[in-house]
Amino acid sequence: MIDLAWLVVAIPLASSALLLLLGRRSDAWGHLLATLAAVASFVVGLLVVLEVLGQSPEERINDVHLFSWIPAGELSIDAGLRVDPLSLTFVMLITFVGSLIHVYSIGYMTHDPARRRFFAYLNLFVAAMLVLVLADSYALLFVGWEGVGLASYLLIGFWNHNTDYAVAAKKAFVMNRVGDMGLIVAMGLMFASLGTVSFSGVDAAASGLSTPMATAIGLLLLLGACGKSAQFPLQAWLGDAMAGPTPVSALIHAATMVTAGVYLIVRADSIFSAAPTAQLVTACVGAFTLLLGAAIACGKDDIKKSLAGSTMSQIGYMVLAAGLGPIGYAYAIFHLVTHGFFKAGLFLGAGSVMHANGDSTDMRTYGGLRKVMLVTWATFAVCWLAIIGVPPFAGFYSKDKIIETAFVGEGWQPWVFGGAALVGAAVTAFYMSRMFFMTFHGKARWVDEASKLGADDPRPRRHPHESPLVMTLPVVVLAIGAVSLGFLLSLGDGITGWLEPVTGHVDHPEPVLPVPVILTATLVLVAAGVALAWRQYGMNTVPLTAPAGSPLTRAARRDFFADDVNEALAMRPGQHLTRTLVYADTAVVDGAVTGAAAGTVASGRVLRKLQNGYVRSYAAMILAGVVIAGAVLHLVRL
Amino acid sequence: MSSLPWITILIAVPLVAALVLWLVPGLHRFARPVGLAVSLVTLGGAVAMATGFDPSRAGEQQLTQTVGWIPSIGASYAVGLNGLGLVMVLLALALVPIVLAADWHAVPDASEADRRATDRRRATFVALVLALASLMVAVFAARDVFLFYVVFEVMLIPVYFLVGMFGGANRRSAAVKFLVYSLAGGLIMLVGVVMLYLQGPGGPQGFLIDNLAGVVSDPTTERWLFVAFFVAFAVKAPMWPVHTWLPDTTAQATPGTSTLLVGVLDKVGTFGMLALCLPLFPGAARWAAPAIVVLALISIVYGALVAIGQQDMMRFIAFTSISHFGFIVLGIFVGSEVAMTGAMFYMLAHGLSIAGLFLLAGYLAERGGSRRIDAYGGWQRVTPVLAGLFLVSGMASVALPGLSGFIGEYLVLVGSFASSIPAAAVATLGVVLAALYFLLVYQRVFTGQPRAEIAQARADGALRDLGARERWSLVPVVVAMVVLGVLPGPVLDLLTPLAQVLALGGAQ
């Protein structure tokens, strides 16, 4: 079955191609085929997992050669699959959550005339993401890496008749390409210094890298990871990416694609282990982004943008853990998996709420929705408890491990990283509770369409209702995962043991604070965050329009001026440069040439005077020409 | 089969067909189908020829034929193909039928009274394209410097008329600009050609490339000769700062002419660098490489930046090409086998993506009545198939992995790192700029809401998505983009041996 692992990729890819090629002819059944393809991919993946489980742990790293892809002399790249516990963990996450989101989308996109195209893009995304995690070389990984970028572009811009959405899609792709540039340069340096870009080749030779080279490669890989995973300083695209249909936000911009950066860092362990500086920077980026994202999530009234800030923040946790080196890898992946479930659940819940509220994303117009959408409320509640890390929900197990590990080390680092992780937990509890209470509890800040209230009532008219089964069922499954996965994956050796063939065996040193102290502090802070949110958003009336807010709130609402910075540093100077160059190209570069041509024409006018029609003067000129030519030839001979 | 003089046949068939179509008025009415048939037959011949090509000896000239031509000056009719030549001939001959199909209405239908004149113009167009096909084969197959030079110059004639007779409003001045630029480059090269002959062994085969390789012993002379050849090729390629003829020409030419011009003829410039500059003047090439690499880097970044600011679709595509040619030249001169292999692959891949972009922009302009970018908006809803194909072509052009453009760009970049990290790092900027320039144009043309009258015309059926002829003209291009992106191996096998022979070791 391991040899057939390529089917995991091929099935959704073929389905996607078929739907795009058949066009409208497949409108009637396209969504069914695509969903079936995602499920089939999951089944094949599961069979592969079962076979790998049958192998002894040290045999579990399988390289499956497919074909010779780029045979270019000194650089010869094969297309092959790395089937090991790390890649299979991702395969399971992508295909399982992916299948659920396909099912959900059947309901969510029912009324969209282009639903078939949507499903074709979803399949394309799944296939590309699977290439990314199954590749056995950085080059093939890059195919999936940019492939998911394209799929993300297509899906963010799925409703690109709205120009803002089209701009958001472009922004995501271009910022991702900045990160991709890092990956290309990293591969160039790998080739220049090691002569290979395959995982096995790089892993075998990486210990021989000079520290500056390893650091450079590590930092460049980190740049790539920052682009894909929306980490500082390439985080600004994620909020805008919420322009895509909500299932897209759930699958791509929460559960799977944005975690690719974490995957890359863990996969490139051999590079990062040789580059402590790069590791430290990684941890710093993670710690900073986890706070940044959490702060942004606090400031947003748009439910999806708040969730986007939350995603940024949770991935910050994972990047922080990955930056801590082998002691953090397994926990980064652990949190990645549990986050995949509860964050997808939260997004789909948000989609359900939006569906019920005429596609409004403004939480200030929600409130009291528990009564009208009980299933959505219950599943959302479970995922909320999971993300803020209440035991025994999944996030408790995975996030707590990261917080503990962040407190390991010497000098200032454990205090800073551990402190950031702790504060992040408190802020997470606050903003997620804020979202939960604002949406489902308190007084309704909408009025029913049927009500007889006067037209001067400022509240929007809505007719909220529970979503159909095809939409609630996937969320229920995700919620079950959000309840149980943390416990299940830490049974026995759990996910740490499963990943050990890849991450290596590590002894976990003691944190600088005793574990019970960290645990207690975390829980107290989480409780405080929830209480604060309840006081402000559960008990009090939430105003329909946002209050002015503190400078911090206003900054968070504007994503801490990320767009303004990008505009001032890159876009405006770039536009200026472009305009100048366009002008210079016609005026200076071309002008010089046309000027020379005009000069020729003018001299032609002078020369025309020599054409006086007298044969003897022509003869004289021919003679002169021959003499000069002869002289030149003579000189050259010499 | 391989005993047939395949190359000569491929040169002769389209040329004879062109003459017949031009000279026999009775055929004018059928010029387009006949031209298409001839071009398909020629392509079939090229494929048959390729089966006789031995890939394991792709670094050598094969299918050679040498006949004395003007023995008194040492010129021979000497043709043959190595791996690169074969790839370029196949690209050229594959694009010819596509261009003929795409430019089917380059001469618009006329009333009954003007029927004869219209047919005559159509026949002229087809004849010129076929003549160009013949010359393209000859230029990639020439093994004699004099023959190469003659074809190089004669090729200007059909292009001049294609641009000057069948283009937009300012076609005449564009054609003249093209001609003057090219002639200026060509004249400098002529000086080089004569000087080179004088340096060589002379005799009836004194112009054979094989007999002239490395004959120049004096470094100063070698450098002058190198420069003389290089300037002509840089104009053709086109490199910054001698690129300004290209945007003006493509803005006026028909989409098909632009496709052949940028997709194939401009490659004669980079082909000449590989086939003449490097083997004839290896020392001078190594001497000039750092300067050329700098010019290539400027082309990459400059072309991309100026592309962002363009208002005309055809000029936009031209500037993206200037950026792409920068990558090709970088790959040739940076001094890495891998990068050089990538550059050669790039020449093929760029031919495909440029065909897609020019032809689709042409189809779009036929519908929207303008080549200005800001005349559009929301056309994805109006012409979804056109938009989808444009996106695929654009993604191939900006080197999305999985499509043909990626292989060349990736090899050029990664290979360059082994020779010069700063140069490669600058070139990588082009990757980001490419995403930006392409998606900006896609956004401005295809996203948003279409204008009301356009949406109305679409609803009335007055405005349609791509028809069968238009779709089928692009199917082979898109299929080739995908196939070469996934399985570039067979083509790379034709190119790597040559890179191993030619690459400038330690150029930096």
Image (cartoon, coloured by chain):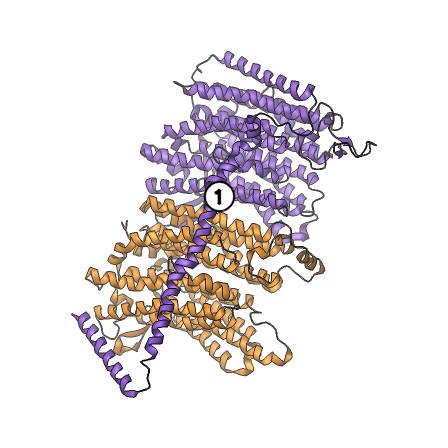
Chain colours: A purple, B orange
Residue B44 visible in rendering: yes
Residue A66 visible in rendering: no
A214 and B8: which one is in front?
A: A214
Q: Quadrant where the N terminus of chain B lies?
A: bottom left
Position of residue B259 measured from the top left corner of the image (x, y, whole percent) = 48, 63
Q: Amino acid at mark 1?
A: Met
SS class, disc 1: helix
Position of residue B406 measured from the top left corner of the image (x, y, whole percent) = 45, 50
> For mark 1, what is the residue?
A571
**Where B386 falls versus A502 (above or below)?**
below
Q: Is residue A385 left or right of residue B151?
A: right
A583 and B7: which one is in front?
A: A583
Q: Estimate how packed mark 1 is, as few (under 14), some (14 to 19) or many (20 or more) residues with alpha carbons within 10 Å.
A: some
Residue furthest left as drawn: A638
The chain under label 1 reads A
**Where B49 falls versus A434 (above or below)?**
below
Position of residue B185 measured from the top left corner of the image (x, y, whole percent) = 34, 66
